[in-house]
Image (cartoon, grey):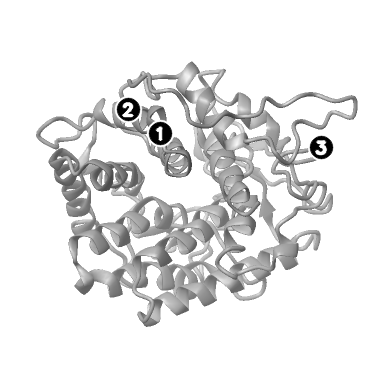
Amino acid sequence: MSTTASTTSARTPTTCADHRYGDPSTRWALLGAETMLSREPRINTRQRWEYEDGLVLNGIYGMYCDTRDARLLDYVRTNIDEFVQPDGTIRHYAYEELNLDHVNNGKAILDLLEETGDERYRAAADTLFDQLQHQPRTNEGSFWHKRIYPDQVWLDGLYMGSVFYARYCALAGRSDLLDDVVRQFTNAYDLLTLDPATGLCRHAYDATRSMYWADAETGLSPHVWLRALGWFAMAMVDVQAYLPQDHPGRAQIRTNLTALLTALQRSRGSGHQPLVPDPGPGRTTHELPRVLGVPHGALGDRDLVAPGLPRRSPVGRGAGTRLDPRARAVPQHHRGGLGERAQDVPGRRARRRHAPRRLLRVLHVRADRHERPQGLWSVLLLATEMERRR
C-alpha cells in the first residue's frame, strides 16, 4: 500500500460538556475512511465475497475522488485484488448461486477499471454482468433476489444488482439493455412493492404468494423496512447517472423517487405505518435518501435536517432520529421487514427490534467482529454528501 501522505486532514472531534461531537468543519467521512485504513487494512479476513465490503470500498473511493489521497485508492485496490485474480476470475465468488448481493462489489471493480484501465477488472465485471444475463426472473421481468429465493423481489436487490447493471451498460455501450435496467426499477415501484395506501414500498414481493410472509392477494411482505427504503431510494438516485437525459425511463424513476421520499417524509410521526426500524449497524441508512435526494431536486433543502440534528453537521446530539413512539417495533427475525415467525426457524425466538441508536455509534462499527460495515458506509456517504454542499 502506498505511503503517499494524505493531502487533506480530518479534524479530530472533541467531546463537550453537552455531549456534542465535532463542529461543522469536522470531516467525518475522512475520519471514517482513516479508521478503516488503520484498523482494518484487510477488510475481509474471512475470505468471503460479501456485499458489505463493497459498500465501504465505494465510500472510500468517493473520498479518494474528493481528496485524491493515493492511500484511499490503494486501499480499494488492495482489498479488491484479494479476490480479483490477474486473469479476472473472482476468488470465493459463487456464480451458481445467482445472488444479486454478489454483484454489489462490482461497483468497486468498475471504479478500478475506470481509474486504472487494468483488464483484470474488465474481465471480472464481465463475469458479474454475465450473471445478470442469466439471473432468473419473475413473469414481470424482475430479477429474483437469489436462486434460493425463487420468484421473490427484494428492494435490496435494486441497489445490489441493478445499479451495477446500468453502469456496466453505460461503459460497455449496451444501450440496447437500458430499457431492461429501467424495467427493474419501475416494476419494483409500480407493479410489485408499492403500498398505495401509504405511498411507501414494502420490503419484498413473492410472485407465488406461497411464502409465509406474503399477503395472499398482493404477495407483499407485511412491513415497510426503513433500510430497504434506503437501498431502493439510493439505487434510484445512483442509476440516473448512467441513463441518458432523454431516456423516458429516467424521468419516470425520478418521479417515483420524489413520490417515495415525499411519502416517507409524510409518514414520519404518523404512527400509522408499519415502519420497522433498522436494528443493525446500518441503522442510519433510512436517513440517506433524505440527503441524497436534495442535490437531485427530490427534496427541498429544508428537508435535509432530521429532527434533533443540528444544521450543517452530519453528527450531533440526538443524531439517531427517533421514530414516533406510536410506531411500535415489530417482532421479526433479522431479515428485516419479512416478519419471520419464531416457529419457522428451529431454536430461534422472534426478537423485538428497537429504534436506531446515535449515528456516532457507527464510527465504532466492526470493533466487535460480529458487527458489519453498513454503518461505516452510511457515515462515509452521508458525511461526504453533506461536505460537498458546504
Residue at horizontal 28%, vertical 44%? Answer: 115
User: Label 1 amino acid?
Assistant: Asp
Check if mark 2's residue and mark 1's residue have beta carbons within 8 Å: yes
> Residue 224, can we see it?
no
- Locate residue 239: give its quadrant: bottom left
Q: Is residue 193 left or right of residue 186?
A: right
Q: Tag 3 or tag 1, which sits nearer the N-term?
A: 1
- Name the residue rendered at 85%, 25% in the picture: 16
Q: Quadrant of the N terminus?
A: top left
- Does residue 276 sit above or below 210 in this rendering? above
Label 2, secondary structure: give it. helix
The residue shown at (53%, 32%) is 8
Cα distance between the residues tagged 3 and 2:
34 Å
| Mark 3 / mark 2, whichever is N-terminal | 2
Q: Which residue is mark 3?
A: 317
Residue at label 1? 53
Numbered tag placed on residue 79 in the rendering: 2
How crowded is the residue under tag 3: few (<14 C-alpha within 10 Å), some, or many (20+)?
some
Amino acid at dot 3: Arg
Residue 343 in picture, x, y percent from top left: 55, 38
Residue type (three-letter) at the residue carrying disc 2: Asn
